[in-house]
């Protein structure tokens, strides 16, 4: 059974806590048990973080940064180990896991820039003999609630920037992929951070709700599905916390007739089927404009049908399993529903469901409309819906009809179309000729509309703003 990290100790949860199995999704085997911690465990973690806060928040910045540099070195040393842990209990391919670890470590790189990032501002002589200075202070105990699909990267979006800013932290990893957060915490201690600066409580809804309502927790970072993002935002805000809550996605890829197929086809496959479609930046609906469908559809479906499905640690595999049997069945249910509602099934990945593990292969549905369930609900699996539009205007209209606005991307050789799309599409992350519009650590990451609740996005300088409160000092001598 995995343990919680409370201050310096790896502790089992309070008596009576239930547990859940952690699987290897490529085989279906149970590899661990994760405890479902409750209020008492959350209280203990918050108490440890509160007690560490008084010293940590006054620890000189350069000492905090030295530890962050050491953490970076330790993470690099364990790069392959972290990638293997991700593949083992999430299922994505080892290359995808390596990409995830790299993107995560980049937030630590960014956090090492704290001496510049945490600077305030000054203005002298604002009135006769009066100066004004702005300082940044930490906010207190912060908590992070990541989803299952990036067990290393998403926790790293949260706690490095929080702790380098002088806060202490309680991480509640996903109960489906708890081993990433667990390993990150072990390495955090190995880097020499003092006890209580990072605490880990494993669990699900009960642990989350205890964090959202805890009077000693000042800020909540959440990444997960849209309904839970809304619940987290409303509950934590009602108890006076600052919140950044990133939700689900229904990302559109617009393909113009002038798109270069050599660039667009592999990019669309990567966007839709990378990480087995379990990505908040996954392209879900490809909107082919004008005659684009005629040139692209055959190439796309041929290539999708040939993608190699299998365990993520086998060489040559391009699409790993889904996270759980129930999730795979839910995705298969969407395919069935799509067909029942009038979509044409061009590639059927359900043939992969007979293998052991939780597999479902790349699937392509054509002639999908926004009114169909598959046209507007997040599927979160390797299913690409192809829709048609007569003009760019119509394609942008289809994307903007969605309640969610995480990412949108366009493939075109026309600067004018690209610019039009950039300015009018309602998505917080917008791409031009790229499969995935992922902001790097030094830019803010987040969607718009139902994909995000809050105002300060995650990481980038928004992250620093989120984890600090500003004080303006007015001085006359
Ligand atoms: P999820 O919402 O089921 O779970 C996310 C976290 O919330 C987990 O830690 C879980 O324990 C907790 N949780 C789940 N149900 C809860 C409830 N009812 N009350 C309180 N806490 C609860 O999401 P998931 O299935 O782990 O992740 C997939 C989802 O995350 C997808 O919708 C995906 O689009 C989204 N996602 C979004 C982003 C983004 O940047 N916007 C990034 C990655 C994933």
Image (cartoon, rainbow, N blue to C red):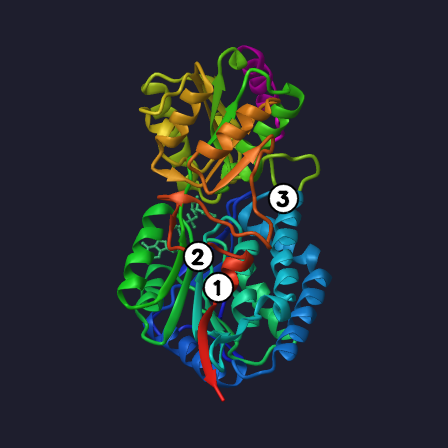
| Residue 263 covered by magenta stretch | no
Q: CB of mark 1 within 8 Å of CB of mark 2? A: yes
* Label whose residue precedes the other's in the sequence (1 or 2): 2
Q: Mark 3: which secondary structure? A: helix
Q: CB of mark 3 within 8 Å of CB of mark 1? A: no
Q: Position of residue 101 (x, y in %)?
A: 63, 53
Residue at position x 50%, y 51% in the image: 23
Q: Residues within 10 Å of mark 2 (few under 14, many from 20)?
A: many
Q: Mark 1: which secondary structure? A: helix
Nearer the observer: mark 3 or 1; the answer is: 1
Q: Residues within 10 Å of mark 1 (few under 14, many from 20)?
A: many
State the image quarter where residue 16 is shown. bottom left
Disc marking residue 96: 3
Residue at position x 58%, y 22% in the image: 305
| Residue 297 covered by magenta stretch | yes
In the picture of the structure, the residue carrying the numbered disc 2 is 456
* Label whose residue precedes the other's in the sequence (2 or 3): 3
Q: What span is colored magenta in the figure?
A: 294-308
Up-down relation of residue 372 to residue 451 (above or below): above
Q: Position of residue 260 (x, y in %)?
A: 64, 20
In three-dimensional space, the C-alpha distance between marks 1 and 2, rounded to whole angstroms, equals: 7 Å
Front residue of 208 and 306: 208
Front residue of 159 and 164: 164
């Amino acid at each position: 059974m995995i343990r919680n990290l409370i201050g310096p100790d790896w502790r089992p949860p309070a008596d009576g806590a239930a547990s859940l199995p952690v699987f290897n999704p490529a085989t279906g085997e149970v590899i661990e048990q994760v405890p479902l911690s409750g209020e008492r465990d959350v209280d203990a973690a918050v108490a440890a973080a509160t007690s560490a806060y008084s010293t940590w928040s006054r620890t000189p910045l350069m000492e905090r940064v030295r530890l962050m540099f050491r953490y970076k070195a330790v993470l690099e040393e364990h790069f392959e180990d972290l990638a293997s842990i991700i593949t083992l209990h999430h299922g994505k391919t080892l290359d995808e896991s390596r990409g995830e670890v790299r993107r995560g470590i980049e937030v630590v790189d960014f956090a090492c820039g704290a001496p510049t990032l945490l600077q305030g501002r000054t203005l002298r002589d604002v009135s006769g003999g009066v100066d004004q200075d702005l300082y940044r202070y930490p906010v207190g105990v912060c908590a992070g609630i990541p989803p299952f699909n990036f067990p290393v990267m998403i926790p790293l979006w949260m706690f490095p920037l929080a702790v380098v800013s002088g806060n202490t932290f309680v991480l509640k990893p996903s109960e489906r992929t708890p081993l990433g957060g667990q390993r990150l915490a072990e390495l955090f201690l190995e880097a020499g951070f003092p006890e209580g600066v990072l605490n880990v409580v494993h669990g699900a809804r009960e642990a989350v709700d205890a964090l959202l309502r805890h009077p000693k927790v000042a800020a909540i970072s959440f990444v997960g599905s849209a309904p839970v993002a809304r619940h987290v935002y409303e509950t934590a805000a009602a108890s006076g916390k600052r919140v950044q809550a990133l939700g689900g996605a229904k990302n559109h890829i617009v393909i113009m007739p002038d798109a270069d197929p050599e660039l667009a086809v592999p990019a669309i496959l990567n966007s839709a089927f990378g990480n087995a479609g379990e990505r908040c930046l996954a392209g879900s609906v490809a909107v082919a404009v004008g005659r684009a469908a005629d040139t692209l559809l055959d190439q796309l479906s041929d290539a999708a049908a040939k993608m190699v499905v299998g365990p993520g640690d086998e060489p040559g595999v391009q699409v790993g399993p889904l996270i759980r049997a129930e999730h795979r069945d839910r995705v298969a249910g969407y395919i069935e529903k799509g067909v029942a509602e009038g979509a044409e099934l061009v590639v059927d990945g359900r043939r992969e469901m007979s293998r052991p593990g939780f597999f479902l292969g790349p699937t392509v549905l054509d002639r999908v409309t926004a009114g169909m369930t598959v046209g507007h609900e997040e599927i979160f699996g390797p299913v690409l819906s192809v829709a048609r539009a007569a003009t760019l205007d119509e394609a942008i209209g289809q994307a903007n009809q969605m309640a969610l606005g995480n990412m949108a991307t366009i493939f075109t050789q026309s600067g004018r179309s690209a610019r039009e799309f950039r300015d009018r599409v309602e998505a917080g992350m917008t791409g031009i000729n790229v499969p995935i519009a992922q902001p790097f650590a030094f830019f803010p990451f987040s969607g718009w509309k139902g994909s995000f609740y809050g105002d300060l996005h995650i990481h980038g300088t928004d992250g620093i703003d989120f984890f600090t409160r500003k004080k303006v000092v007015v001085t006359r001598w």
